[in-house]
């Protein structure tokens, strides 16, 4: 593989890993703060699924990147070097906001992984085949709560609708790609993320309709940035907390 | 987390392998059967405990009471002949 396509693949793998790590870290903040015990554990399980997926991806990235370790990608990069979709770094908010984020992201991840299973890159195809089972459950969990809140009490309906509306402007960024990615799409290694948008919209729309919620206006202004190294202000706080120990004690082993 | 306003209680039974009996694993709180099943999956299948789950509303379980222990169970104490210990079990028969 040429250096260019290797760089493109590395960039793509890190993007997938960053999405999983940042969202997993966010969800882990619910641990011990969940609305009730069972749901606390459900979200912690989901967070651990994401961290597990991150490890597969960062380990693979390391093999493409001169033998770097998975810890390097998690603990030794700065905010602007993370390429996670903006929606994954948003604060948890109330439970409706966390569920809306899970719904938007899980529908996307499910579509992406379905395509990625067909990748000509055997490692990515293998990753996708493993991850899609976890993601299918995450999606089921998110849909279940969206229906409960949307079709629940007047207050739960209002709060779910607000969360759906608040987060919608960050959904477009999930579909952002880079110039590099085109070569991977042409080579059958990466799915064409743009092509997932129509199916994503259709699925989200159908869930919201069943939940008696209103799909936000498709013309809503969309914040972009994750593929051009620009983040929301929230990423720095996540990185600071996540990297504190490794920064304070560089190279320490335990 | 508060203990107020907990959802109803469900008992969880997990089957470890195909063909084996379901065993009581514990309980979960849930608003309905779908949530009960998902909660049970999250709590009781995290460490490869099983391949199938039953959830049952705890209120649907009928239990014997401690006062009945005597009349329910003691009569079988002196009926050793009910145990299949007086038979020769053929070597070919397994799983008894």
Image: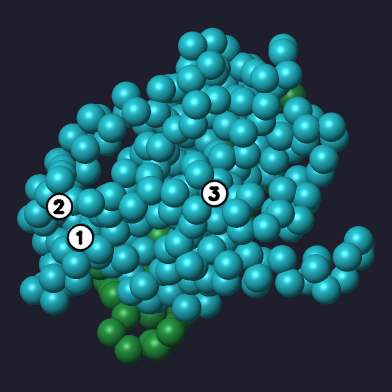
Chain colours: A cyan, B green
**Secondary-structure class at tag 1:** helix
Q: Give the residue at mark 1.
A: A165
Residue B34 in picture, x, y percent from top left:
28, 54
State how far apart marks 1 and 2 are (Cα). 6 Å
Q: Give the residue at mark 2.
A: A216
Circles 1 and 2 on the same subunit: yes
Question: What residue do we see at 25% from left, 63% from top?
Answer: A166
Protein chain holding label 1: A
Residue A211 in picture, x, y percent from top left:
13, 54
**Which one is in front, B67 or A90?**
A90
**Secondary-structure class at tag 2:** loop
State how far apart marks 3 and 1 are (Cα). 25 Å
Circles 2 and 3 on the same subunit: yes
Rendering quarter of residue A177:
top left
Question: What residue do we see at 50% from left, 53% from top?
Answer: A230
Within-10-Å neighbours for mark 2: few <14, some 14–19, many 20+: some
Q: Do tag 1 and tag 2 residues touch (Cβ < 8 Å)?
A: yes
Protein chain holding label 2: A
Question: What residue do we see at 13% from left, 67% from top?
Answer: A157
């Amino acid at each position: 593989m040429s250096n260019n396509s290797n760089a493109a693949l590395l960039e793509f793998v890190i993007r997938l890993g960053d999405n999983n790590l940042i969202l997993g870290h966010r969800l882990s903040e619910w641990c011990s703060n969940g609305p009730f015990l069972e749901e606390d554990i459900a979200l912690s399980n989901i967070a651990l699924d994401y961290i597990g997926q991150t490890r597969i991806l960062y380990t693979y990235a390391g093999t493409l990147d001169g033998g770097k370790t998975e810890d390097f990608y998690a603990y030794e990069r700065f905010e602007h070097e993370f390429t996670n979709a903006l929606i994954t770094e948003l604060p948890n908010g109330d439970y409706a906001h966390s569920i809306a984020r899970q719904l938007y992201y899980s529908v996307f991840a499910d579509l992406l992984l379905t395509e990625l299973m067909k990748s000509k890159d055997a490692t990515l195809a293998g990753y996708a085949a493993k991850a899609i089972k976890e993601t299918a459950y995450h999606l089921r969990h998110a849909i279940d709560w969206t229906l409960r809140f949307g079709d629940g009490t007047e207050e739960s309906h209002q709060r779910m609708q607000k969360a759906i509306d608040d987060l919608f402007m960050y959904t477009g960024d999930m579909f952002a790609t880079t110039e590099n990615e085109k070569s991977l799409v042409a080579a059958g290694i990466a799915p064409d993320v743009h092509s997932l948008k129509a199916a994503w919209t259709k699925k989200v729309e159908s869930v919201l309709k069943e939940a008696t919620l209103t799909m936000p206006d498709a013309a809503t202004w969309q914040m972009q940035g994750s593929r051009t190294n620009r983040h929301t202000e929230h990423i720095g706080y996540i990185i600071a907390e996540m990297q504190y120990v490794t920064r304070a004690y560089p190279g320490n082993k335990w | 987390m508060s203990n107020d306003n907990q959802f109803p209680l469900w008992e969880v039974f997990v089957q470890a392998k195909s063909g084996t009996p379901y065993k009581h694993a514990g309980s979960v709180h849930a608003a309905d059967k779908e949530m009960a099943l998902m909660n049970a999956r999250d709590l009781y299948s995290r460490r490869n405990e099983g391949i199938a789950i039953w959830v049952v509303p705890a209120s649907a379980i009928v239990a014997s009471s401690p006062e009945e222990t005597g009349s329910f169970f003691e009569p079988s104490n002196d009926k050793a002949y009910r145990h299949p210990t007086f038979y020769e079990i053929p070597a070919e028969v397994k799983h008894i």
